[in-house]
Image (tube, coloured by chain):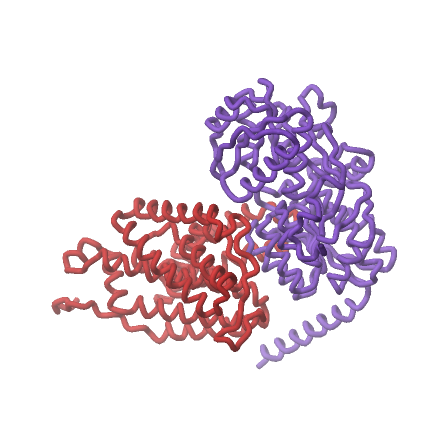
């Protein structure tokens, strides 16, 4: 009986606490949720850095001075779709987040996208690559911020072909992602007057690329395109260095690689590698200013990856839109406002958001420096070509997104 | 010791009241759990609990350590997702299809793998499961690493909409309890007694005239079918079917769940599954970003401690203390 009473008291306390919380929520509160890979293969691309980037955006937004209370919540989805979906639902159902940022993993991103639409919240994807998010899986509640598979294929394919790399050979990861990257890139290469001499498939998580690299070398193609990601890219790049691919005059193009990957591979091995990014920390004054703020607080003074820069930029713009609207409650309205407002921040400069939810900004073809060219910590790449904003992403006329009126 | 001749059918051990009590307590606890814990998480955890219980039927009661159960769990998830989304089947039909698919697949895989024993058996199941994984990675139906997303939960029997998380939870709870009862029934049937006899001494079971291979095959099929039911239910709960469920780490995870909870106990795998599911959830909650990098390390440490401290698993150890079967 005594226990029953104390239980009752505890429940009443809980209920009143919950009520107090609800009463407080009527004030101007906005809650940002960073859902990312915190412990898996992409932890350095997003992870803790994404949380830091979101925090920097919150600090810079100045919303606290305008009477807003901005909360930040973080979770690791472990690259499991069910864990990600569970966290996203719980955040929305229990009022812990109004917006989910990052995600990184395409499977998790697509699952979150559905949930966000059902609950009418906001999804700002920075890390996941799939261009389906602005294609057939587009919704009025999401924005694809940093890059996508189309931009990567287009950037690397177009700029390299125009720069004289007019014959290509692909080493492709043997699954949907790799094949899509190869398909999109070869279309761009051919459209720009180049030719594709051939391709070779490598299984996912391949440890030995020697046979593929030998075939690529003997093809005499000017560019060897690596249509893979993560550990596969790193392995292929390391082994290409052992085979002396770049020293023998062939160019190596990684279709998806991040600053943190280059940091871990090292310049000796990665030198000469060409890749596309939409943000590089040493691009211009704005990019450097953001990187400076970021690395002051990051672990090992790391510079931000483009995914982390995207988290910062997206969160900042989201908070602007929420402030303009006065409430984060209606997700679709916030996204509509975000599309209406022009974007402007240190990392990406001025830009805009298209009706299909695609954030538009320039992309850059970068080349990894040689150890001799690298003058200071994190001085890893130089710009080879700039792809203007209007050419960097898939044109609306090709979009499968139902939101696009044709 | 009695000196009676062995009958042609082994007699089944009669279920004890303590087991029913444990079952009733578990059911009651799970029925009120959504009041305190987020129902979506609970529903996913129950799917894994059923998966672990199904796996336990094979490893705990038949002594067959399959290292490829993700094939049935994940494969059935794809079947249920495909049926519910593309063919627009109602949830109950999608689940039946998933269960039947996994059961049939299990009979096939079982027939191949039980021809070898011990580590070779495990390796064959692993190899076949990996074939399934790469098939799912490549096949256009399964959409590679994106998986099948946005699976509709539909209406149960055309009446009850499952889109509400609570309704979904109670549906999964019913499936789970039914699955657990089925396993209990199988284990305590003459068939189950024969399985245990095979586990303890296979040559002796053969010399007693049992068709050992047929028993193993059926046990494999039953375990796979129940794992399939769990996988199908998970596809409906999370509204997606992805490669995670097919990966070999999932086969490893279910072994971990069963070992942690207690192999060969009724409630052990359930507790083990909930425990394994809860660790990242709790770490995510209390940890924040700097903690989450240590997630795998902390998980590993907890498992090492559990294995060292509770050799029979959490429930197995309790049962041994209380000298009861739980």
Residue at (70%, 57%) from the top-left corner?
A: A403
Nearest the eye: B72 or A117: A117
Is residue A212 at all visible to an observer of this figure? yes
Farthest-out residue, right: A66
At horizontal 68% and vertical 72% (from top left) the residue drawn is A14
Front position in the image: B87 or A211? B87
The shade of chain B is red
Residue drawn at the location 31% of the way across and 67% of the way down: B186
Q: Quadrant of residue B316?
A: bottom left
In the rendered image, the vertical position of residue A203 relative to residue A79, given as above or below = above
Q: Quadrant of the N terminus of chain A?
A: bottom right
Q: Position of residue A348 (x, y in %)?
A: 78, 41
Q: Which residue occupies 56% across, 36% down?
A: A227
Q: Locate residue A162, reporting x and y percent.
A: 68, 28
Position above or below: A183 against A248:
below
Q: Please state the horizontal and vertical placement of residue A207, each as a whole percent of the image.
A: 48, 33
Q: Compared with residue A211, is residue A387 higher up or lower down, i.e. above or below? A: below
Residue A229 visible in the current orientation: no
Please state the total of marks drawn on the protein image. Answer: 0
Q: Is residue B266 above or below residue A59?
A: below
Q: Residue furthest bottom?
A: A1
- Looking at the figure, which quarter contains the C terminus of chain A? bottom right
Left or right for B73, reference A230:
left
Chain appearing in purple on the rendered image: A
Residue B325 position in % (x across, y down): 35, 67
Side (left or right) of B141 relative to A69: left
């Amino acid at each position: 009986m005594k226990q029953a009473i104390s239980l009752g008291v505890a429940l009443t306390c809980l209920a009143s606490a919950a009520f107090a919380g609800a009463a407080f929520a009527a004030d101007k509160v906005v809650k940002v949720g960073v859902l990312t890979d915190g412990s898996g293969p992409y932890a350095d691309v997003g992870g803790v850095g994404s949380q830091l980037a979101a925090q920097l955006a919150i600090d810079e937004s100045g919303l606290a001075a305008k009477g807003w209370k901005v909360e930040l919540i973080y979770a690791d989805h472990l690259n499991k779709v069910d864990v990600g979906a569970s966290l996203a639902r719980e955040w929305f159902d229990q009022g812990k987040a109004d917006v989910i940022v990052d995600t990184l993993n395409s499977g998790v991103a697509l699952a979150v996208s559905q949930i966000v639409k059902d609950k009418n919240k906001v999804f700002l994807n920075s890390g996941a690559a799939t261009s389906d998010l602005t294609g057939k899986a587009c919704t009025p509640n999401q924005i694809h911020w940093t890059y996508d598979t189309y931009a990567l294929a287009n950037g690397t394919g177009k700029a390299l072909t125009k720069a004289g790399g007019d014959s290509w050979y692909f080493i492709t990861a043997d699954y949907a992602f790799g094949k899509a990257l190869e398909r999109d890139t070869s279309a761009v290469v051919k459209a720009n007057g180049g030719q594709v001499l051939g391709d070779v498939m490598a299984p996912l998580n391949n440890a030995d690329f020697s046979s593929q690299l030998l075939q690529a070398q003997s093809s005499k193609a000017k560019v060897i395109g690596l249509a893979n990601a993560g550990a596969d890219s790193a392995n292929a790049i390391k082994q290409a260095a052992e085979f002396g691919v770049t020293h023998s005059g062939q160019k190596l193009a990684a279709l998806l690689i991040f600053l943190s990957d280059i940091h871990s591979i090292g310049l000796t091995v990665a030198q000469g590698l060409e890749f596309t990014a939409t943000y590089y920390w040493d691009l211009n004054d704005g990019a450097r200013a953001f990187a400076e703020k970021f690395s002051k607080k990051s672990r090992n003074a790391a510079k931000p990856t483009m995914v982390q820069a995207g988290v910062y930029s997206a969160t900042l713009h989201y908070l602007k839109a929420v402030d303009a609207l006065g409430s984060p409650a209606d997700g679709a309205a916030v996204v509509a406002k975000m599309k209406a407002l022009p974007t402007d921040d240190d990392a990406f400069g001025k830009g805009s958001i298209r009706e299909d939810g695609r954030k538009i900004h320039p992309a850059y073809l970068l080349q990894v420096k040689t150890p001799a060219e690298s003058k200071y910590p994190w001085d890893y790449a130089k710009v080879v070509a700039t792809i203007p904003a209007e050419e960097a992403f898939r044109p609306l006329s090709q979009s499968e997104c139902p939101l696009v009126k044709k | 010791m009695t000196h009676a001749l062995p009958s042609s059918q082994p007699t089944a051990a009669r279920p004890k009241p303590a087991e029913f009590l444990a079952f009733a307590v578990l059911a009651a606890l799970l029925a009120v759990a959504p009041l305190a814990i987020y129902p979506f998480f609970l529903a996913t955890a129950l799917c894994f609990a059923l998966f672990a219980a199904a796996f336990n039927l094979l490893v705990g009661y038949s002594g067959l350590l399959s290292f490829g159960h993700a094939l049935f769990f994940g494969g059935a998830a794809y079947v249920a997702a495909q049926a519910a989304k593309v063919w627009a089947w109602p949830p109950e039909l999608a689940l039946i299809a998933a269960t039947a698919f996994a059961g049939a697949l299990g009979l096939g895989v079982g027939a191949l793998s039980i021809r070898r024993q011990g580590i070779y058996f495990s390796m064959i199941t692993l190899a076949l499961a990996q074939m399934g994984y790469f098939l799912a990675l490549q096949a256009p139906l399964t959409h590679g690493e994106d998986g099948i997303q946005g699976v509709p939960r539909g209406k149960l029997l055309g009446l009850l909409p499952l889109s509400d998380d609570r309704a979904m939870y109670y549906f999964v709870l019913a499936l789970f309890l039914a699955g657990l009862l089925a396993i209990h029934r199988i284990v305590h049937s003459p068939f189950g007694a024969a399985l245990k006899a095979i586990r303890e001494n296979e040559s002796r079971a053969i010399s007693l005239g049992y068709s050992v291979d047929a028993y193993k095959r059926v046990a494999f099929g039953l375990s796979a079918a129940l794992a399939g039911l769990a996988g199908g239910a998970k596809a409906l709960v999370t509204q997606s079917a992805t490669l995670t469920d097919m990966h070999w780490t999932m086969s490893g995870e279910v072994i971990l769940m069963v070992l942690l909870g207690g192999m060969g106990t009724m409630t052990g795998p359930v507790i083990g599954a909930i425990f394994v599911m809860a660790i990242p959830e709790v770490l995510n909650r209390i940890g924040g970003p700097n903690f989450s990098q240590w997630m795998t390390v902390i998980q590993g440490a907890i498992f090492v401690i559990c294995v060292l401290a509770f050799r029979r698993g959490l429930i197995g150890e309790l049962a041994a203390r209380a000298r009861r079967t739980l």
